[in-house]
Image (cartoon, helix red, strand yellow):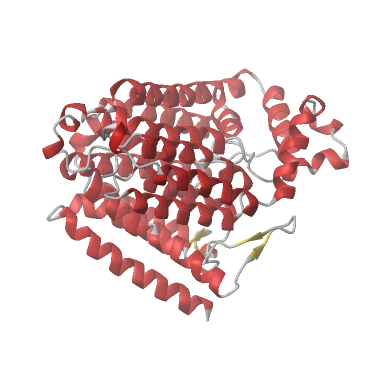
């Protein structure tokens, strides 16, 4: 029964996406990248079925994603690869490749390079689409794509289909197999509705409210906290409408503040109270993993213990390990899970060179946003980078396609808006470049 519901949701979302793609006219490259993202969500929305190995130890989910990425890569104009802003990312991909070769991690290297190719394809083609069509048509198509995961989640709530975590927490994530995967998708959706140039402020509030509710229902603590910058950005957008102060209505701003206060009681108090405990005990948690007590290992769903194990293993490595890490998808042997922290994952797998370059890339894009993006778009874009920084403390992004999609869309939108200041100064021809609501 649930699989039938999932298939119907996938079919309905495809119909919505195809209808929305009409806004892109006769542009097969723009349509291809939108459909690539939708196809990944559709495969993931099939639940456990596509995660089973079907050939060479690879699942239908992995093989399907690889095939879709490679097919889209084949139509990518080679001239797009000469974009100077792509060079730092190619450098980080090169460090990943070098680390994988030096550590003999050939199998994991294939998956890692697929993710990097996916990032390049999505970032370049979305950037091209934004430059050709503007913010409103392209982000409108992307919002249609996100109707699939959000729609599945709403149906799972209506049908009472939930997932029970190891710690007893309840999460509604549609047909997705893990809260972190769905929550990463939902985080991207919240950012998209924050940055989209809605015609009416009421629509902005409704869209943000729906996506925040989706995030709360997914019940992934770290990424719920990562949504706080979006709330700040929305409040700033509502406070600065571009109208004379005497004509601004305070009602939308008041509703946004009341909505924020209304969401707080919905949050799982026990799980967030644990954050306070962790902060008060942080001095006692900075130690080797073997010194953790049984109670300390359970703090923050074992995040502190896992992090300590990864840091200790990195310190115990040699000079080469310190420089380029243990290779893609490497894990501490006695932990058998990724570090649930993007900074630690990058450090452990690509060394100090990889982490330094990754942080440099993020700071460069933040600087680009502050210096070159039109003023009205700064808060929505900065909220995306702030959410990425906060979310990276409790989960990893670049080890799964859903995280790659979020980062690629964020970077592509930044590149576009950073080069559109002149166009944004001409409202009559902006095609939605401005980020204010009418």
Residue found at the far top of this picture: 319
Q: Position of residue 189 (x, y in %)?
A: 42, 50
Q: Residue at x 84, y 34 (%)?
A: 292
Residue located 40% across and 76% down the image = 8
Instruction: Answer with left or right where residue 120 lies relative to residue 178.
Output: left
User: Looking at the picture, how far across and down is residue 354, in whole percent?
Assistant: 50, 25
* Residue at the front extreme of this rendering: 246
x and y, in percent, of residue 53 in the image: 53, 63
Residue 114 position by quadrant: top left
Percent across and percent down for residue 300 are 73, 42
Residue shown at 61% from the left, 43% from the top: 222
- Residue 138 appears in view: yes
Q: Quadrant of residue 407?
A: top left
| Camera-nearest residue between 250 and 68 | 250
In this rendering, the count of numbered labels is 0
Split into 4 quadrants, where in the image is the C terminus?
top left
């Amino acid at each position: 029964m649930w699989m039938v519901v999932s298939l119907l949701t996938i079919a309905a979302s495809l119909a919505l996406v195809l209808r929305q793609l009409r806004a892109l006219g006769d542009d097969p490259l723009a349509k291809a990248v939108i459909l690539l993202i939708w196809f990944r969500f559709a495969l993931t929305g099939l639940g456990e079925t596509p995660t089973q190995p079907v050939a060479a130890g690879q699942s239908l989910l992995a093989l399907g994603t690889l095939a879709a990425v490679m097919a889209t890569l084949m139509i990518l104009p080679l001239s797009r690869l000469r974009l100077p802003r792509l060079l730092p990312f190619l450098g980080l991909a090169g460090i990943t490749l070098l680390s994988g070769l030096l550590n003999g991690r050939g199998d994991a290297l294939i998956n890692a390079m697929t993710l990097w190719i996916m990032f390049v394809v999505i970032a370049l083609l979305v950037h091209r689409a934004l430059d050709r069509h503007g913010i409103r048509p392209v982000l409108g198509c992307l919002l249609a794509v996100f109707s699939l995961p959000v729609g599945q989640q709403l149906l799972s709530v209506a049908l009472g289909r939930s997932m029970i975590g190891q710690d007893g927490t309840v999460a509604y994530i549609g047909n997705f197999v893990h809260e972190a995967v769905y929550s990463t998708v939902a985080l991207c959706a919240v950012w998209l509705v924050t940055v989209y140039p809605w015609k009416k402020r009421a629509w902005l509030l409704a869209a943000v409210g729906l996506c925040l509710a989706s995030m709360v229902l997914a019940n992934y603590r770290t990424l719920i906290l990562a949504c706080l910058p979006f709330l700040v950005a929305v409040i700033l957008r509502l406070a600065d409408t571009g109208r004379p102060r005497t004509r601004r209505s305070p009602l939308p701003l008041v509703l946004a503040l009341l909505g924020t206060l209304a969401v707080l009681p919905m949050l799982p108090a026990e799980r967030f109270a644990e954050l306070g405990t962790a902060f008060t005990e942080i001095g006692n948690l900075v130690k080797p993993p073997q010194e953790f007590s049984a109670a300390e290992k359970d703090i923050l769903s074992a995040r502190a213990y896992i992090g300590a194990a990864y840091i200790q293993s990195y310190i115990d490595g040699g000079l080469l390990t310190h420089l380029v890490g243990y290779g893609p998808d490497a894990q501490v042997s006695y932990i058998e899970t990724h570090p649930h922290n993007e900074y630690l994952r990058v450090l452990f797998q690509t060394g100090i060179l990889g982490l330094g370059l990754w942080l440099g890339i993020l700071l460069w894009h933040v600087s680009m946003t502050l210096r070159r993006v039109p003023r009205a778009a700064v808060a929505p874009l900065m909220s995306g980078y702030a959410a990425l920084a906060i979310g990276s403390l409790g989960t990893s992004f670049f080890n799964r396609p859903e995280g790659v999609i979020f980062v690629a869309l964020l970077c592509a939108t930044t590149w576009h808006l950073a080069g559109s200041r002149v166009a944004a100064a001409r409202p009559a021809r902006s095609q939605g470049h401005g980020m204010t609501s009418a």
